Image (tube, rainbow, N blue to C red):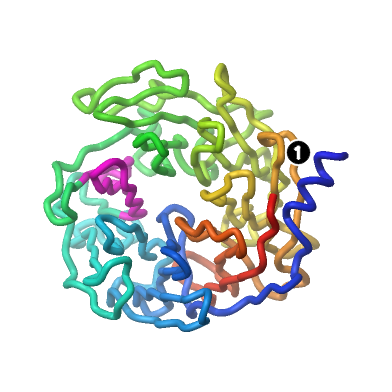
Amino acid sequence: MLALALAALSLGAPGAGAATRTVAPCTWSFFGDPRAVAHGDRVFTGCIDATGRVRLERYDLGSGRRRLITLFRGLEADDHNNPSLVFFRSRLFAFASEHAGYVYPADRDSRMEYRVSRRAYGAGRAWGPTRRVPLPRGCGLGYTYPNPVVAGRRLHLFMRGPCWNPYFTSSADGRRWSRARTLVLGPPSAGDRIRPYAKYDAAPDGSILMTFSDGHPGQYENSLYYMRFKAGRFYKADGSVIGTLRDLPFRLGELDVVQRYSARAGRAQPADITWDASGAPVIVYTSRVGFDEDFRHARWDGERWVTRLVAPAGSGEGLFGYRNGGITFDHADPRTVALSRVIDGRYEIELRRTPDGGRTWAASQLTRDSTVLNFRPVFPRGLADPARRVVVYVSGTASSFRRYDTEVKMRVEPAVTP
């Protein structure tokens, strides 16, 4: 009880001094990250609107000034087409692609495009021309879910590849790209619609952390997997080597198993991954058991993966087939997560914080008594302001990934010293 009380104090009183504002009338998906980044007091948020325009807002937390621009046009109304943002060599990069696969013509000219700010840290209005990452056609299913990650002196771009498997390339200068490679393969003999889902993040030691599922929990009995990449080698959490770049692609069974599927454990799907203050990899994910889903937290304790419940996520299919509204870490302080779950029949945004590595969690509800969906919250990456806490999320109505009447909201409130 004492631990819960201390955690509740560290979250602060919900709503005290808080302000919620609209970024833009648009949306985003679960698996393209980062969706919002920060440098100093400036927060940059990207999203896709209902006409297929990719929007980017720059918001100054100190002055309240904002600037909203269109980065890409004509990408179709589809939440998969939201931009992913990253700072590299002091410039802001924005990546976006048209969603492609069985829903769309298989012979479409799928592409991964990006633009780069002309001024340091995206401070100005001017952006460079649209560029295309050179990628092969592969199986012809196209690309989606860009995940740019900076590790060392290279910019790595992970994505779902042309055969629907995790795929990546990298660049030392943001213009010339290495040969794209398939990272892992989905389950053998599982059918061509089964595709792994993935999350990535950079660690302070120059590693890149990765977590995967076999497929979508609505289609496959998923386990959850982990591996780490550094200096051309891939590792399990215990430091054992899985292989090198020459050994790609790996089968998922060669990776660390964080949660193995069983009827009791459920079907896992990754939601976020990062590195905690002690230097241990931590993962938040969902697990589907029957009609219900839970949010869970996994941490490597030096010998094994320890998984614990964060909160029940909900049941039914109120969010066009999804049974949860998403969960993410505050990457500046992974003791805190933001999540969307069903509370009194509504999808609401909630913060949860653990003082003890996931054993106990205290909750602070950010939205309540809502008449619309509130889902897919994120903390802007790179924002480490001890005086403020910022959560960005989607709010509105949506009947599918292509039909939505939503806004991206930003909630800014005073943070409380842990």
Residue in the picture at 63% in, 67% down:
374
Residue 293 percent across, percent down from the top left: 66, 45
Which range is magenta?
A: 144-170
Q: Which residue is mark 1?
A: 360
Residue in the picture at 63% in, 76% down:
20
Looking at the picture, does residue 92 appear above or below residue 129? above
**Residue 208 sits inside the magenta stretch:** no
Looking at the picture, does residue 315 appear above or below residue 182? below
Residue in the picture at 65% in, 76% down:
19
**Residue 148 sits inside the magenta stretch:** yes
Q: What secondary structure do most residues of the magenta stretch adopt?
A: strand
Which quadrant of the figure contains the N terminus? top right
Q: How many marks?
A: 1
Judging from the image, what secondary structure is the residue with disc 1 in?
A: loop
Query: Relative to 128, is 363 on the left or the right?
Result: right
Tell me if I can see residue 97 in this picture: no
